[in-house]
């Protein structure tokens, strides 16, 4: 068993807040030191916002849990200062194969175009992800950043008020109280915060169960995603195989609905299933076993006054498609810059309503795709099964049928179409960079575009003139000037110009497009800045 599960990363230490005569008020308190809570804390602290993260645990999550991290979240992690360790340790992959019975019916490539700094996906155990995030927190603390993790601090009660929230926290040395101007709940699918506030999920729970087994073995399978429908070793069900670092392989086996979960998790029942899949001659060791049920649900709202929800605390999807942790990081990416503007008094707190609008849009998109995947993987009628099997048979020979196969539509970044922060599209440019879209990367000589955008408002000009700096109502926007003359690969023109000869983009701190035009117009871009900060 990996020793990482046993090492406290943020052990309990007594805080001065526990000896204060009155509850200490903090700008932001985050509940939960998992990937989403840590990511949220790092994002805010990098912007100079004082953050306290509380968690009743003191070490990484047990088991590999979330393992698939997509290109967009890796780009977000780059801005948080911890993307490179993940890529260095992770297993890169961009090819998936789909099998029906014992036949390969087709394969797909997730990132067919070149010119991106980050791969389509990496596989990495969640416990490494959490460790790297904690390492980043420690690095920031050493540099004097305003961030603190309090392990062994369990939130026992929450009170909400118009301008703050109150928290009662239990520790090994007794309880104490603190206050937060803003409270961000990142405390997972079971979210005690959600329960304490009497809030619930809406959505659907699917009648099926899946076994997860992390297996340590030496195998010559390639670094690809392999998915089986109705395989010989798990008849009438499905299976998934993924490679992780350290010789660990993730195996998912569909079990059906009416099962005894405790019995199915016992090694004497798991091992025969794995032998049927891998063969009797393959030696392996079980590292972790779990059983999960598909759920596609979300809160009706992610913002409740001074309390905001992110990650699994706000929404849940089935794991096929890798949309859980990936969408949670996009929550924090959307929320961080908005909360910073509100705290600094450069935007009204109504800007946070756009977090609700945009990330509910993202959650609904994920739930739709995840629900469709689940319905395809686990048909609930004989007619649905016949249709699915016919699609799989056709996909083996005919390309038109392959997009209909749904073994888990894999995570892609959300485009905030219809967001109130968007300005009307005024450029005859590529659809992939319309307002609301995340910026695609572009190679710029030996560098790439996204690191140059950073985490602030940018005016990206391509063969167009504009001021180097614009300040509008306290918000500063700096110019990044590019030209297609230096575009050796053609990617800049293809991804940002299309048929246009020049362009000016207003890009938000989360690297989503807020506005674009063929040339700079001072009044129109100032209006776009106000709109992107919730003032229009």
Image (tube, rainbow, N blue to C red):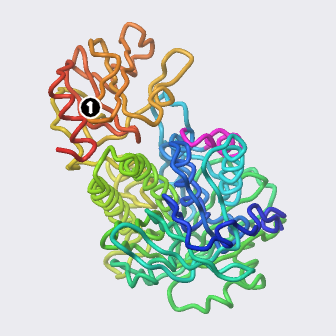
Q: Is residue 466 above or below residue 290?
A: above
**In this rendering, does residue 432 appear at all?**
no
Q: Is residue 349 above or below residue 255?
A: above
Q: Quadrant of the C terminus?
A: top left
Percent of width and height locating residue 138: 71, 49
Q: Is residue 109 magenta?
A: no
Other-residue count near label 1 (Cα within 10 Å), few / some / many at <14 / 14–19 / ≥20: some
Q: Is residue 514 above or below residue 67?
A: above
327 relative to 2 in the view: left or right: left
| The residue stretch that appears in magenta | 79-92
Percent of width and height locating residue 33: 61, 63
Percent of width and height locating residue 450: 47, 30
Q: Is residue 87 magenta?
A: yes
Image quadrant of residue 373? Answer: bottom left
**In this rendering, does residue 309 appear at all?**
yes
Q: Which residue is mark 1?
A: 472
Q: Quadrant of the N terminus?
A: bottom right
Report the residue at 24% width, 33% height from top: 515
Q: Main secondary structure of the magenta part?
A: helix
């Amino acid at each position: 068993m990996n020793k990482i599960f046993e090492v406290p990363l943020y052990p309990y230490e007594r805080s001065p807040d526990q000896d204060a005569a009155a509850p200490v008020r903090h700008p932001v308190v985050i509940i939960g030191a998992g990937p989403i809570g840590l990511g949220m804390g790092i994002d805010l602290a990098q912007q100079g916002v004082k953050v306290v993260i509380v968690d009743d645990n003191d070490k990484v999550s047990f088991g590999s849990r979330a393992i698939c991290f997509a290109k967009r979240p890796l780009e977000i992690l780059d801005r948080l200062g911890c993307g490179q360790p993940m890529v260095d340790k992770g297993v890169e992959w961009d090819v998936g194969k789909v099998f029906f019975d014992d036949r390969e019916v087709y394969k797909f490539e997730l990132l067919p175009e070149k010119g991106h700094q980050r791969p389509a996906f990496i596989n990495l155990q969640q416990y490494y992800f959490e460790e790297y995030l904690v390492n980043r927190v420690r690095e920031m603390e050493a540099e004097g950043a305003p961030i603190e993790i309090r392990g062994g601090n369990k939130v026992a009660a929450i009170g909400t008020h118009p301008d703050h929230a109150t928290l009662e926290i239990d520790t090994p040395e007794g309880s104490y109280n603190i206050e937060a101007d803003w409270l961000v709940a990142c405390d997972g699918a079971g979210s005690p915060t959600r329960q304490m506030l009497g809030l619930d999920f809406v959505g659907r729970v699917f009648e099926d169960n899946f076994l997860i087994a992390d297996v340590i073995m030496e195998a010559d399978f390639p670094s690809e995603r392999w998915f089986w429908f109705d395989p010989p070793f798990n008849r009438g069900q499905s299976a998934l195989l993924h490679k992780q670092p350290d010789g660990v392989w993730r195996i998912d086996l569909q079990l059906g609905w009416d099962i005894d979960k405790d019995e199915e998790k016992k090694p004497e029942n798991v091992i025969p299933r794995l032998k049927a899949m891998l063969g009797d001659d393959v030696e392996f060791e079980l590292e972790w076993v779990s059983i999960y049920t598909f759920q596609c649900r979300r809160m009706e709202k992610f913002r409740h006054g001074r309390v905001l929800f992110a990650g699994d605390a706000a929404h849940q999807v089935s794991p096929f498609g890798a949309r859980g942790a990936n969408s949670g990081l996009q929550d924090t990416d959307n929320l961080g810059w908005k909360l910073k503007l509100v705290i600094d008094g450069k935007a009204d707190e109504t800007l946070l309503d756009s977090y609700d609008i945009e990330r509910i849009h993202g959650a609904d998109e994920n739930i739709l795709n995840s629900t469709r995947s689940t319905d395809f993987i686990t048909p609930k009628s004989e007619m649905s099964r016949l249709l699915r099997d016919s699609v799989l048979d056709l996909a083996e020979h005919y390309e038109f049928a392959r997009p209909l196969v749904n073994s888990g539509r894999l995570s892609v970044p959300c485009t905030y179409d219809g967001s109130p922060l968007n300005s009307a599209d005024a450029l005859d440019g590529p659809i992939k960079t319309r307002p609301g879209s995340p910026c695609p990367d572009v190679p710029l000589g030996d560098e790439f575009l996204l690191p140059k955008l950073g985490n602030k408002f940018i005016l990206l000009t391509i063969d167009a003139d504009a001021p180097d700096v614009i300040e509008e109502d306290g918000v500063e926007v700096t110019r990044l000037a590019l030209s297609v003359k230096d575009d050796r690969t053609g990617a800049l023109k293809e991804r940002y110009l299309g048929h246009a000869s020049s362009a000016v983009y207003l890009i938000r701190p989360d690297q989503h497009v807020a506005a674009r035009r063929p040339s700079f117009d001072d009044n129109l871009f100032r209006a776009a800045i106000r709109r992107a900060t919730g003032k229009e």
